Image (cartoon, rainbow, N blue to C red):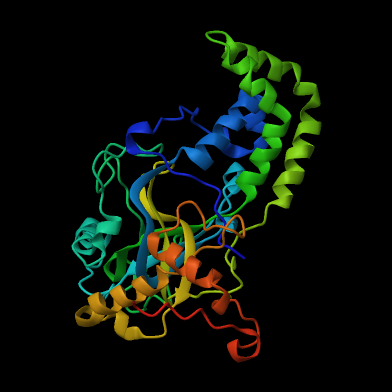
């Protein structure tokens, strides 16, 4: 089973603010349709799947860190549950907990120290990023970049993270740990949006795009269809249920737990759909690393290069059986070609059902 992938990213110069209304707009699927019609739902779909992620230039990014926390669809409510990606926050190696200072006042100090680390570029604010939807003028590190943090008790460890909404939290015993956000893509957005497109797509592509009056006509048609809203909601609700709750076990690898040391491989992007941060989205490959030496400062560079080089050669499962995915790296294509050679296509053992490659012609 291949890692799921439904989204694309856009170049920073091509990003467009979606202009969604504020307030409690996203409280439910029904409110979205009632306030803006199915055309607004399709605009939300387009933004979630193909608009909110800004490419940061590496579709084959490798990262090594310790699992600091998880974010699941169960942590969301209302219409936010449309996005059912399974998120893992990584404390970046090497030595992710060294040098941390306790208290909210040192939140940005900890962030700057992590940025100066050996993988700090991954969580560093990149130039030219668009303003995020939920960005605030006074947010830190900047109005365009909120970063991602996890709270850790100074006496505990990554294996015992502090819940976000804990009572009687002590500022003097809490680390605000900068983390790298990663997301395994869920399929609910894709499934629901495909159903909405089947219902409304023809109107969206014709009437709604009429110059000047298209938006008004779209809204009027959606008002006319309001009596059929229960039927529309039933169709979309069926699609909603069909979408899996999350994809934490996308490749049959079993559950992870806090403090596990892992390597991840995927697309590096900036998420403008929240307060603004960098993330790995989608995650295409995850594996546990059994050797804690990787997280030691003096050994990290060598071991990271070796691990990432080896993982970078693994081709993703292709769309067809005859060629690798379009965005496969040169190393992945080389592995793919080697796997297709007759001498490497054995099933039981090469001595039983294998073959030998033709001997090369001797030199003249």
Q: Residue at x 33, y 37 (%)?
A: 12
- Left-right relation of 208 to 88: right
Q: Seen from this angle, which residue lies furthest top?
A: 212
Residue 344 pos. (x, y %) = 55, 78
Image: 54 above or below 325: above
Image: 340 above or below 112: below
- Left-right relation of 157 to 248: left
Q: Quadrant of residue 72?
A: bottom right
Nearest to the observer: residue 199 or residue 174:
199
Q: Seen from this angle, which residue lies furthest bottom?
A: 351
Q: Quadrant of residue 274?
A: top left
Nearest to the observer: residue 196 or residue 232:
196
> Which image quadrant: the C terminus?
bottom left
Image: 246 above or below 67: above
Q: Residue at x 61, y 17 (%)?
A: 208
Query: Is residue 166 at all visible to an observer of this figure?
Result: no
Residue 354 pos. (x, y %) = 61, 84
Residue 152 pos. (x, y %) = 36, 69
Query: Is residue 32 at all visible to an observer of this figure?
Result: yes
> Which image quadrant: the N terminus?
bottom right
Nearest to the observer: residue 167 or residue 113:
113
């Amino acid at each position: 089973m291949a890692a799921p992938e439904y989204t694309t990213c856009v170049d920073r110069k091509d990003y467009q603010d979606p202009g969604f209304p504020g307030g409690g707009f996203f409280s439910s699927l029904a409110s979205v349709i009632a306030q803006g019609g199915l055309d607004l739902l399709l605009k939300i779909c387009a933004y979630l799947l193909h608009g909110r992620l800004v490419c940061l230039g590496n579709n084959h990014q490798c990262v090594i860190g310790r699992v600091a926390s998880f974010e699941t669809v169960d942590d969301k409510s209302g219409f936010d549950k449309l996005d059912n990606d399974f998120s893992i926050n990584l404390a970046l190696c090497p030595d992710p907990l060294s040098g941390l200072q306790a208290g909210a006042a040192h939140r940005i100090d900890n962030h700057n120290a992590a940025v100066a680390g050996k993988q700090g570029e991954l969580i560093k604010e990149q130039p030219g990023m668009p303003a995020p939807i939920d960005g605030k003028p006074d947010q830190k590190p900047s109005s365009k970049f909120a970063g991602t943090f996890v709270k850790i008790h100074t006496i505990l460890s990554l294996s015992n993270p502090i819940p976000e909404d804990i009572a009687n939290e002590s500022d003097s015993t809490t680390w605000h740990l900068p983390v790298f956000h990663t997301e395994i893509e869920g399929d609910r957005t894709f499934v629901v949006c495909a159903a909405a497109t089947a219902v409304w797509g023809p109107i969206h592509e014709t009437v709604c795009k009429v110059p000047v009056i298209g938006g008004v006509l779209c809204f009027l048609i959606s008002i006319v269809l309001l009596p059929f809203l229960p039927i529309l909601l039933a169709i979309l609700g069926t699609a909603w249920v069909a979408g899996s709750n999350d994809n934490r076990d996308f490749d049959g690898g079993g559950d992870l737990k806090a403090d596990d040391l892992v390597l991840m491989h995927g697309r590096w992007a900036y998420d403008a759909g929240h307060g603004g941060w960098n993330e790995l989205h989608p995650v295409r490959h995850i594996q546990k690393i059994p050797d804690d030496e990787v997280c030691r400062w003096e050994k990290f560079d060598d071991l990271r290069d070796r691990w990432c080089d080896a993982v970078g050669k693994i081709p993703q499962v292709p769309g067809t059986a005859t060629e690798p995915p379009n965005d496969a790296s040169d190393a992945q294509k080389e592995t793919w070609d080697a796997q297709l050679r007759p001498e490497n296509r054995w099933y039981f053992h090469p001595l039983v059902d294998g073959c030998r490659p033709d001997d090369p012609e001797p030199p003249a």
